[in-house]
Image: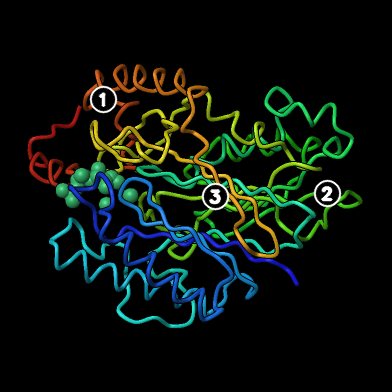
Amino acid sequence: MKTTFSIIKADVGGCPGHSTVSEKLLFVAQKKLEEAKKENMIKDFFVTHCGDDLELIMTHTKGEDSEEIHELAWNVFKDATEVAKENGFYGAGQDLLKDAFSGNIKGMGPGIAEMEFTERKSEPIVVFLMDKTEPGAFNFPVFKIFSDPFNTAGLIIDPNLHSGFVFEVWDIKEHKRVFMRTPEEMYDLLALIGAKSRFVIKRVFPKEGGKLPPDEPVAVISTEKLYQIAGEYVGKDDPVAAIRAQSGLPALGEVLEPFAFPYLVSGWMRGSHNGPIMPVGLCNAKCTRFDGPPRVVSIGFQVKDGIITGYEDLFDDPAFDLSRQKAAEIADYMRRHGPFEPHRLPLEEMEYTTLPKVMEKLKNRFEKM
Ligand code: F6R
Ligand code: MG
Ligand code: MG
């Protein structure tokens, strides 16, 4: 029996503002999922938040895109929205774009990252949850984890990793996807995913002939909102990812390593600024300075027969102190640019803009030159 690992998340109300999620909402989710576990709908679960996003992590045997699991998550978000409304939390229900559930949560607002796989003897899974950024923010670390030998030593010295991986890349604008192989197509892959607001890594697969089945993903990233409303820019998604580790895959430490460098992502204040991604422990998963800086938390799980047998808050560790310090310095440096690019995003990527109104006001004052 295969195991399905599902992360389904939504912003159903922040407290205060867009900074974090109230304990009251976490409690609602915890209760609902406890019931679902008792009724054997799910095998196990973990509820948490990153910034203002409520995160439901669930294990079950119902496969990806299960109507039952998606409806369960939808109902959790609905109930949490009610509590958010009663308490006047900010933006109550903001990610629930539809009124009624209709079979699949995709395109209804929440973000989803799911993978179904055959459990190995021991199955370590690393979850990453980001706030105040977009799915393309995972391109840099996921590339490094599965393709950069300066990050992942195993690509060079472990015979099980040496042949490389297959990346599923989505073109958000054209609504198409392509499968690309590394190391042989590494330069072509980078030509695409360097444009992170258009091309996003959706999944990673092992190659044929190795220890792992080539048709079962080893990494998955949430991209659903962007996927459903292709052709137009729909803003930042606050993405999540799940990555399987060890034994023929990058080691836990190789999976975490890219986050030692606080690379630049887009999002931050009003979804319209570039800033560093700051790796933090769950106790610091709140967005404060200039509604940020964008945060990432990581929780490592061991899963056995679909049960979560242990977990750890992985960035809650002095080994990442320097990265946080660096992120704070970069945040300071970027902020000094105020309304200027490249701190502020290029026009077509901004979530908020007054430019059409400014242009309208000035239209009769522009002179031909
Ligand atoms: C960014 C984000 C926040 C808000 C900002 C303004 O993703 O959620 O930075 O954009 O706090 O929010 P409103 O317009 O709701 O006052
Ligand atoms: Mg919000
Ligand atoms: Mg958010």
Q: Please tell me in which quadrant of the rendered image residue 139 appears.
A: top right
What SS does tag 1 mark? Answer: loop
**Which quadrant of the figure contains the N terminus?**
bottom right
Query: At which x and y percent is residue 363?
Result: 12, 42
- Disc 3 versus disc 1: distance between alpha carbons? 31 Å
Q: Is residue 352 visible?
A: no
- Image-based side of 163 in relation to 129, left or right: right
What SS does tag 2 mark? Answer: loop
Badge 2 or badge 3: first in the primary sequence: 2
Residue 340: which disc? Answer: 1
- Disc 2 versus disc 3: distance between alpha carbons? 20 Å
Query: At which x and y percent is residue 279?
Result: 45, 32
- Image-based side of 155 in relation to 20, left or right: right
Residue at image position (55%, 60%) is 175
Residue at image position (41%, 30%) is 278
Residue at image position (89%, 48%) is 210
Residue at image position (37%, 69%) is 31
Pointer 2 local density, CA inside 10 Å: few below 14, some 14–19, many at least 20: some
Residue 207: which disc? Answer: 2
Query: At which x and y percent is residue 208?
Result: 87, 52
Of residue 61 and residue 176, the one placed in the foreground of this image is: 61
Disc 1: residue Cβ within 8 A of ligand 1's nearest atom: no
The answer to whether the residues at label 1 and label 2 have Cβ atoms under 8 Å apart is no
Badge 3 or badge 1: first in the primary sequence: 3
Amino acid, disc 3: Ala
